Amino acid sequence: MRSVPDWLRRHPGLAFGLLAVLLAVLPFIVSIGLGRGWVRVLDFALLYAILALGLNIVVGYAGLLDLGYIAFYALGAYLFAWLSSPQFGLHLPFWLVLPSGALLAGGFGVLLGAPTLRLRGDYLAIVTLGFGEIVRIFMNNLDAPVNITNGPQGINLIDPISIGGFSLGARHTILGVHVFPPTFYYYLFLFFTLFTILVAMRLQDSRIGRAWAAIREDEVAAAAMGIDTRNIKLLAFAMGASFGGLAGGLFAAFQGFISPESFNLMESVMILCMIVLGGMGNIPGVILGAVLLTVLPEALRYLGAWQRAALGHVVVDPNDLRMLLFGLAMVAMMLYRPAGLLPSRQRRREFRAEDGAAEQEAASLYDAKA
Amino acid sequence: MTTLLTVENVTKRFGGLSALEAVSLTVNAGEVYGLIGPNGAGKTTLFNCMTGLYTVSAGVIRLDGVPIHNRKPHQIVGRGFARTFQNIRLFANMTALENVMVGRHARTRTGVLGAVLHSRRCLAEERDSRQRAKSLMAFVGLKDRSRSLAGHLSYGDQRRLEIARALATEPRLLALDEPVAGMNPNERREMSELFRKLRDAGITLLLIEHDVKLVMGVCDRVAVLDYGKKIAEGVPDEVRRNPAVIEAYLGGAVS
């Protein structure tokens, strides 16, 4: 990254320290500077970062286009709701429920992966899209004959996460300062985001990560190099899905309420956009994409107020304008930075195809001359 | 001399077309075995059947006496049979070293947990893979190209890299599909040097080649395929004088 100043590059420890301090005090800065509501936005940014990093394993590393990723988020959220809400009268502790959600989602990841192994590209996208919709529709309709999901009304009064009797869902006064739930959840989500980053990083740099990259590049050659393409692809589905399930559980606990509405196709598309916008396959890029696409739409809500301030009245409904600007931004991105804001080493090369082509041509000319 | 690979009556049909018809051959351990024949004779099809990319319609292929036909490619690699491709299939956007390290996949065991926790085995395997990959790159003559992108290497170097990658799987039998195609005479000479080095390292080579001179110079034995059938087999000199072979290559006699 060229944008990093030299003095920071020379002292990576110092850079990490600064980043750690910044992340630690961020919710307080944000709530003082922008208002308490923005801490919630921050929480969602972290949640989406986990989701985007999970989907990045499937799409960015293994090259399997998954348009139904939100289904795993839904499964994690619903499992959390079932196991700790009045819906079934169960109130299991979060340290049991969160991993179960990840496991359930991972299992469904394999279930989705198995029949789609032979599919690539467009075909895989369509099947996964269908899967995402099926899960949502199931959640919408599983309220009769036996009420499992409470249908479109969703499940309410989900237990907040409480660690050793300290509920993250209540206001606490610490050192005379009122601290609100979103701040507590911020730290919890930050922890899980860092955990996800660690797992994604280490996997990427392992033989498994190389196998994913190989499959993405050339599946036949990967198989001929001794990679069990079936298992390695299923593993990508399972790993990605588990993070979706984990994020879903966190979401359910944070919101206290879930309904099928939260898990529609648009959400899957948004998460995919985060990856593409930020830089597919590159962890900092994916996080940047997640943060931008969570914060930007919120910031654009102020468009109404700005219009009133500048023009005296609201000309265009801020909600419409918001989506319009958002769409424009995406189009501009794809035109000017197709590999994303912070592309991975590999993507940058792929999108610089001309260079490679020129070199190849030079090489073949050399062969012809000799 | 022990037999390493036996192909017995292998037939491969695509719809009504027989690409291979009852082909049989045996490759002995330690030899360089050439597979020649005109374009479309079925050489690559036979390779694909042997390495698990195609299922065979009939017949048996054994490696060390164990049937390997209709097994998955990765299982066959696991048994010590690696290959390269006629139209180079490298992982173009990975570095040369990473390409070779992918070849270590079949010989390493680290799972998700080990990789995430950086278990002792994971770190040891990773170090070992890197080291082996580097020495293999040096072996094929690509010592300084580790960090280059595979797709950016020159054509000849890509062929070498593909061989290094296949060698990383620790094969006993290495099948090379037209490894010198498109190379200039200089590069061809260097490649035949490499083949000898490989044989001296104890690796049995199976070679598809068009360049008759190279085949005659390097191979211990040769089989000739034409229209999916084996029309000759033997030591190069003998095969070269075989009338059926001459006819296949030059067309029927005029008189």
Image (tube, coloured by chain):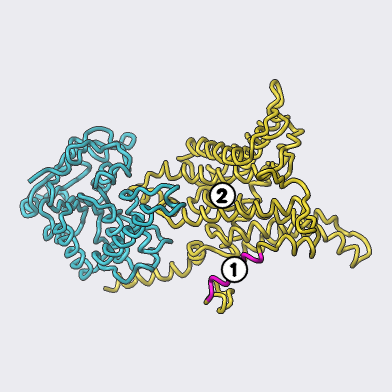
Question: Foreground: B30 or B51?
Answer: B30
Q: Is residue A336 magenta?
A: no
Above or below, comparing residue A139 to residue B137 in the picture: above
Tally of marks: 2
Q: Is any part of residue B89 visible from this angle?
A: no
Report which residue position mark 2 lands on.
A54
In x, y percent, where is residue B118?
43, 54
The residue shown at (20%, 53%) is B207
Extreme top residue here? A145
Question: Quick check: B61 left or right of A27?
Answer: left
Which image quarter: residue A317?
A: bottom right
Above or below, comparing residue B183 to residue A48 in the picture: below
The circle on residue A17 is 1
Quadrant of the image for the C terminus of chain A? bottom left
Question: Foreground: B207 or A241?
Answer: A241
Question: Quick check: A152 left or right of B71?
Answer: right
Chain of the residue under the numbered disc 1 shown in the image: A
Which image quarter: residue B159?
A: bottom left
Which image quarter: residue B210?
A: bottom left
Per the rendering, the colour in which chain B appears is: cyan
Per the rendering, the colour in which chain A appears is: yellow
Q: Is residue A12 magenta?
A: yes
In x, y percent, where is residue A368?
30, 70
Q: Tell me which segment is drawn in magenta.
A: A11-22
Q: Secondary structure at mark 2?
A: helix
Question: Foreground: A81 or A336?
Answer: A81
